[in-house]
Image (spheres, rainbow, N blue to C red):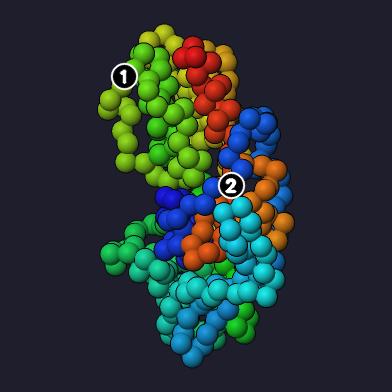
Amino acid sequence: MQFCKLNVFCATLGSVAALVFTGCIDDASFDSDRNLAMRSRGNPDSTYYYQIDTVKQEINLHSRGLCKIETASNLQWDATADSPSLMYKYTFSNDTLYLENYDRSVLVRTSGTPGSLDGTWKVVRYFNGLGQEVPGKESSGLVANRVITISGDSFKETGELASTFDFTKSMGLQSTMRFAFEALDGTYNGTGSESGSSFFIESDLHVDMAYEYTVVSRTNTSIEIVRNDHTFLFEIIEPKVSHFEKSMTFKLTYDGETCTFNYEYFPITKETCDVNHPEPLVFSNGDKLVFSAETSNHYSFDSCFRKLFELL
């Protein structure tokens, strides 16, 4: 699942998240207008937490319970289970903390308490996995203002959606633009929506090089264009990102008619460890464990998309 690239929790579990276990995929009763981004899944910090190993100089991710796959149709929550995963290796010198991530990227942080790990730390420099410094950035692009609070062996990291992240250049929005243009041109033969996670990934696509259109207005979360006398508006509404969760609503408006796509990614808790969940979920798992899930109204959005362009 490509959204692991930019999500700290998912990155830790990236080696096992490549396997996908799908439950309750019947989307017929799913409400396309439901605002998933506003619905609470509970506090993820009550399930997952970090701990510092000062001997090995490691920060590990732990869990208070795990969702286990008993059979293809049976998930069980084990409240006593824990599967620690390495998040960072660290070195510490005076007022500087160097954190090496799973992909060998390095975050360099400074604090106001030289000589002590305890305190509040902020990113001041970022190096990518090749060891190259990324100038003027405090993060990998999606998450900004990342802050670490350390107290004893307790390690807590927070961050927020970077205001500079351009959703109009994301893989999901660029692909949907291409699908819309293909539908308009009569060459459409694919799905009307990328995976919701792809809206949080920078794109290598260049739709503007393959199609001609005029930009009416543009922000980091919306682009309005005119192509062949038809008006398109692509919007990302209320995108939210944390180290454990992502959600957003995407709207495609074509000649005054709108289709809405909702997406949510969240960690598995005791309440969501259920293959017979009332919503269609896609579970990320490995080694007979389920770590996270995502849900969207992909099918109803695709149906709306086809009606919008008279493809039915």
Residue 54 position in % (x across, y down): 51, 88
* Among the 4 quarters of the image, the one containing residue 113: bottom right
Say which of 228 and 125 sits in front.
228
- Residue 223 visible somewhere in the drawing: no
Please tell me whether mark 1 or mark 2 is closer to you in this view.
Answer: 2
Q: Which type of secondary structure does the marked residue at label 1 adopt?
A: loop
Question: Which amino acid, by three-letter code, is at mark 2?
Answer: Gly
Q: Residue at x 58, y 78 (%)?
A: 51
The crowding category of the residue bearing disc 2, from other C-alpha atoms within 10 Å (few below 14, some 14 to 19, many at least 20), is some
Which is more toward the observer, 8 or 21? 21
Q: Residue at x 35, y 69 (%)?
A: 104
The residue sitting at 57% across, 15% down in the picture is 257
Query: In the drawing, what numbered circle is on residue 23?
Result: 2
Query: Which element is circle 2 on?
Result: strand
Q: Amino acid at mark 1?
A: Glu
- Report which residue position mark 1 lands on: 212
Counting residues from the N terminus, which is met first, the one under dot 1 or under dot 2?
2
Residue 158, horizontal then vertical, whole percent: 58, 63
Relative to 199, residue 90 above or below: below
Which disc number belongs to residue 103?
Answer: none
x and y percentages locating residue 227 in the rendered image: 39, 15
Q: Residues within 10 Å of mark 1 (few under 14, many from 20)?
A: few
**In the picture shown, does residue 203 fall above or below 126?**
above
Locate residue 115, reporting x and y percent: 51, 88
Exactly how many numbered labels are in the figure?
Answer: 2
Q: Nearer the viewer, residue 184 or 300?
A: 300
Disc 1 and disc 2 in contact, CB within 8 angstroms:
no
Decide: is 281 above or below 137. above
Question: Is residue 137 visible in this depiction of the protein?
Answer: yes
